[in-house]
Image (spheres, grey):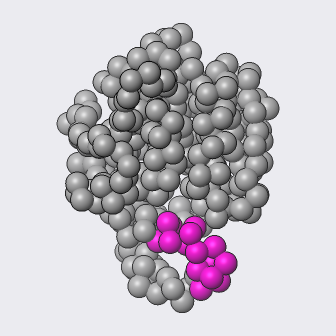
Amino acid sequence: MEEQELIQLFPTISSREKFYIEMVDDAKVMVYKFLPNIEKKSVIRAPILFVPGFTSYFSQWSTIINYLVEKKHSVYVFESREKKTSTSKVSDPRFDTDGLIADLNDVVAHLKLPQPFFMIGNSLGSAMILKHVIDNEKNSSQLPDKIALLQAVYTSAPLQRFIDLAERKILFHIAMRFILTFSPIIFWKSRRETPNSYRNSLNNLRNTELEKMRIGLICSVNLKIIDDLPKVKLPTLAIGIGNDKTHPKEQAILISKQVKNGIYHEIPDKEYVDTELTAKLITDFLEK
């Protein structure tokens, strides 16, 4: 994303930058860094690492990021390797769910965020954070103080029909291009009833490299962490969406019950998932 686009998305944030972090297989992943304006006697709050979901770009979460930075949090956004911003290839050894989690671990180690720090994850990003916490149970320098999980899931979201389609390469590419071309007609009901959700989904799809998406879908079935959730002892906010079929709220509810210090909160409509209402909910939990 160019500097002018960053300014348009984050007009009140004075410090915005992006940089690559190189992984062990030579792939580079993008991290965006947003710093608050610091004035005399300002209360500097804990930094936050934000992990968007599968093929979900940070631009979708600009309202929440702006809100967090206005509250004096430094916010770092890690865009995982299945996204167009990375230099990874689908043939890379880390191009699977385990690889995404290993990348997250390396990003946290590289950033060396001062304690305390927080982590926020969306969809697959929430599961990646849970696995990161589980894997670093005894490594306190890598652990955040609190985690907030938006559209929280502990295993692959119910996308089996897309995963089945992804296994048929040519048909997948044809189908995705058809959807991109005729989405206003195919999703006319969603476009009318949930315009914000429709717009974000379409923008994410337009920004996605289809082959990365295809392989990512096939690999996503590997993630199963439900049996290890009791190892998560950090205060955890699991947010479910009442009408979100892609991320069943039952997964968020179960996460909140299985981790040691979990809280569940439900947002009734996915139209509000990336609004200030959600940002305030998350911020109140992190700063409590």
- Residue 214, position in %: x, y? 41, 61
- Residue 216, position in %: x, y? 43, 53
At 49% from the left and 66% from the top, the residue drawn is 200
Q: Residue furthest bottom?
A: 185
Res 206 quadrant in image: bottom left
Q: Is residue 272 visible?
A: yes
Depth check: 84 or 178 in front? 84
At 64% from the left and 21% from the top, the residue drawn is 234
Depth check: 279 or 31 in front? 279
Q: In the rendered view, tell whether residue 204 sits above or below residue 107.
A: below
Magenta span contains residue 198:
yes
Res 59 quadrant in image: bottom left
Q: Which residues are magenta?
A: 188-202
Looking at the rendered structure, the number of numbered marks drawn on it comes to 0
Q: Residue furthest front?
A: 40
Q: Is residue 105 visible?
A: no
- Residue 123, position in %: x, y? 57, 48
